[in-house]
Image (cartoon, rainbow, N blue to C red):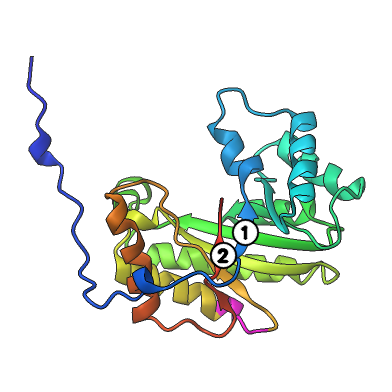
Amino acid sequence: MKRFDHTKYKPFPPIPMPHRRWPDQAIEQAPRWCAVDLRDGNQALAQPMDAGQKQRLFDLLCVVGFKEIEIVFPAASAPDYAFTRRLIEQRRIPDDVAVQVLTPAREALIEKTFEALHGVRKAVVHLYNSTSKVQREQVFRMDRQGLIEIAVRGAEAVRRCAARYPDTERVFQYSPESFTGTELGFAAKICEAVMAVWRPAPERPMIVNLPATVEMSTPNCVRRPGGVVRRSHPRPRGADPERAYP
């Protein structure tokens, strides 16, 4: 039996940040919380929730006081699409609550997502495409520019679809999926390309999400990549960093 060769795995490279400021900061006001139990949490269950259970949980999250609630991936399945329509058509979403939905950077799925949201008062549309080095080389077989073009086309489709539904108050969100496996300079560059399409401003904010899709380091390293991106690339007016996901 061949012995396991642990030497083929490289350790997570440390990111030097000698002038870190965040450990000395104190929270003085509550961040913006977004509950993701209905979507991200649900997919982790051995037995996913049915529509009735999702409805009860959504109602409970509203009672608790969450103002942003991620509900589903509308274009992923008929049940997810139907649940989105149920919330909207039955007027189950309070006026001060924004529902968040997820969509990959694929035009057909983006259009389906906006169709599902028709009639909603407030929404966060979360666009993503995977950017990690491994997926770029082994799955997509593209160079960096190829993935930037995917992100830009997706951002353009989101902006175009949103224009068809002017009555909805929307915030756009972008994630370089698998950020923890993405080179920091490239992650910043692809976020900037999306920002150039959406052109965030104080009256038209966007959210930049840097997800730890795959944990690749010890906890003391998790905060550093995001800090490097934020400090190396000044935040444009309208990009929102003060958001938390319980």
**Which stretch did the figure color magenta?**
197-202
The amino acid type, in three-letter code, at marker 1 is Trp
Residue 47 horizontal/vertical position (percent): 61, 23
**Vertical placement of 207 versus 84: above or below?**
below
Give the side of residue 40 with respect to residue 131, left or right: right
What residue occupies the far top of the structure in this picture? 1
The disc, 2 or 1, on the residue closer to the chain's N-terminal end is 1
Residue drawn at x 51%, y 69% as measured from the top left? 27
Badge 2 element? strand
Give the side of residue 61 with respect to residue 208, left or right: right
Residue drawn at x 9%, y 31% as measured from the top left? 5
**Vertical placement of 224 versus 103: above or below?**
below
Badge 1 element? strand
**Vertical placement of 1 versus 212: above or below?**
above
The N terminus: image quadrant = top left
Residue 58 horizontal/vertical position (percent): 76, 43
The amino acid type, in three-letter code, at marker 2 is Arg
**How far is disc 2 from disc 1 in space, using C-alphas?**
6 Å
Could one spot residue 144 in this view of the protein?
Answer: no
Residue drawn at x 84%, y 52% as measured from the top left? 93
Q: Residues within 10 Å of mark 2 (few under 14, many from 20)?
A: few
Front-lying residue, 222 or 174? 222
- Is residue 201 rendered magenta in the image? yes
Residue drawn at x 73%, y 46% as measured from the top left? 61
- Is residue 232 rendered magenta in the image? no
Q: Residues within 10 Å of mark 1 (few under 14, many from 20)?
A: some
Quadrant of the image occupied by residue 227? bottom left
Residue 95 horizontal/vertical position (percent): 86, 61
Residue carrying label 1: 33
Confirm or deny contact between disc 2 and disc 1 (CB under 8 A): yes
Residue carrying label 2: 243
Could one spot residue 55 in this view of the protein?
Answer: yes
